[in-house]
């Protein structure tokens, strides 16, 4: 796996801060929010400085019953090429349903919805992933998502589901430790058990993000500071493997330079402490 280092999700609202933050090795940009022929000046300047940029898709819906849309795949491939990206990433989720084959209107969820952990759903996901891989010029990494519910009749744990996905397709994994924490609070799933069962040799990189708990439900808001429990999950992951890259996400209520720098430093400390523990 390519070494990425420590990164941050690039957003226009914090572009100036990102340009000044020390030790930012790479950034991730939401693929649907950029146009290959008209990249923002701040993003082009980062690339000119040698900063790696990875497009992160949110609309393919690889976990849905439909095959991936050719236009969406072409657009993602164009962005990977325009950014000279070493890989692209997407989500293990579905985002739309309905259509002519169902005799119901096509609906866009506007949200990443969890795929049932069943053999049938895994078969569909694997075929959609293979189609996407064939259409993309670089390797694909897929992210585990946060969810509020478990589907009835699930046959596989998340770790087993992801392991079989990797074994059958060779896809890489983007592990979001905040989502593991979310699923711990909302679905009672132990992050340590998940990490023990994951094929970490397929790890491409890691997401870290903030959230908030209200009335016993964890909201993966990307609008709050990263909490200690999320950093603890990152530490547990780093104790098991050395992540090629770790990235801080923030999508709303953007803080100033100092808070962003502090959160990146906290991520670096977790990684360094894990390395010291491994060497001891």
Image: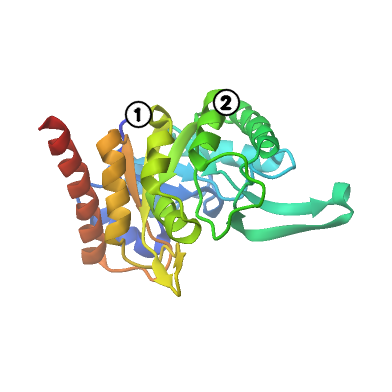
User: On the rendered image, what quadrant is the N terminus found in?
Assistant: top left
Give the image's coloring scheme.
rainbow
Say above or below: 86 vs 105: above
Coordinates of residue 263 in the picture (x, y in percent)? 25, 58
Q: Earlier in the sequence, mark 2 or mark 1?
A: 1
Q: Which numbered tag is attached to residue 225? A: none
Say above or below: 263 vs 55: below
Q: Secondary structure at mark 2?
A: helix
| Residue at 17 percent of width and 33 percent of height | 278
Q: Secondary structure at mark 1?
A: loop
From the image, tell me which residue sits under label 2.
169
Asked whether residue 49 is in view, the answer is no
Q: Residue furthest bottom?
A: 215
Q: Quadrant of residue 279?
A: top left
From the image, tell me which residue sits under label 1.
2
Q: Of the residues tagged 2 and 1, which is closer to the observer? A: 2
């Amino acid at each position: 796996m390519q070494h990425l280092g420590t990164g941050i999700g690039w957003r226009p609202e914090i572009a100036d801060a990102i340009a000044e933050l020390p030790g930012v090795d790479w950034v991730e940009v939401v693929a649907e929010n950029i146009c290959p022929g008209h990249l923002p000046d701040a993003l082009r300047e980062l690339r000119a400085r040698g900063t790696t940029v990875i497009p992160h898709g949110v609309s393919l819906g690889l976990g849905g019953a439909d095959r991936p849309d050719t236009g969406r795949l072409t657009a993602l491939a164009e962005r990977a090429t325009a950014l000279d990206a070493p890989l692209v990433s997407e989500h293990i989720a579905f985002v739309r349903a309905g259509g002519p084959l169902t005799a119901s209107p096509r609906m866009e969820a506007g949200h990443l919805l969890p795929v049932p952990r069943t053999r049938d759903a895994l078969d569909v996901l694997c075929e959609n992933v293979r189609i996407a891989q064939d259409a993309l010029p670089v390797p694909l990494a897929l992210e585990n998502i946060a969810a509020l519910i478990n589907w009835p009749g699930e046959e596989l744990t998340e770790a087993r589901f992801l392991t079989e996905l990797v074994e059958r397709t060779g896809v890489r994994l983007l592990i979001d430790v905040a989502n593991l924490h979310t699923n711990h609070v909302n679905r009672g799933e132990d992050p340590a058990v998940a990490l023990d069962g994951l094929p970490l040799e397929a790890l491409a990189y890691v997401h870290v993000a903030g959230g908030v708990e209200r009335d016993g439900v964890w909201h993966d808001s990307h609008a709050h500071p990263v909490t200690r429990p999320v950093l603890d999950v990152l530490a547990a992951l780093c104790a098991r493997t050395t992540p090629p890259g770790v990235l801080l996400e923030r999508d709303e209520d953007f803080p100033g330079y100092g808070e962003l720098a502090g959160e990146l430093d906290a991520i670096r400390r977790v990684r360094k402490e894990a390395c010291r523990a491994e060497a001891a």
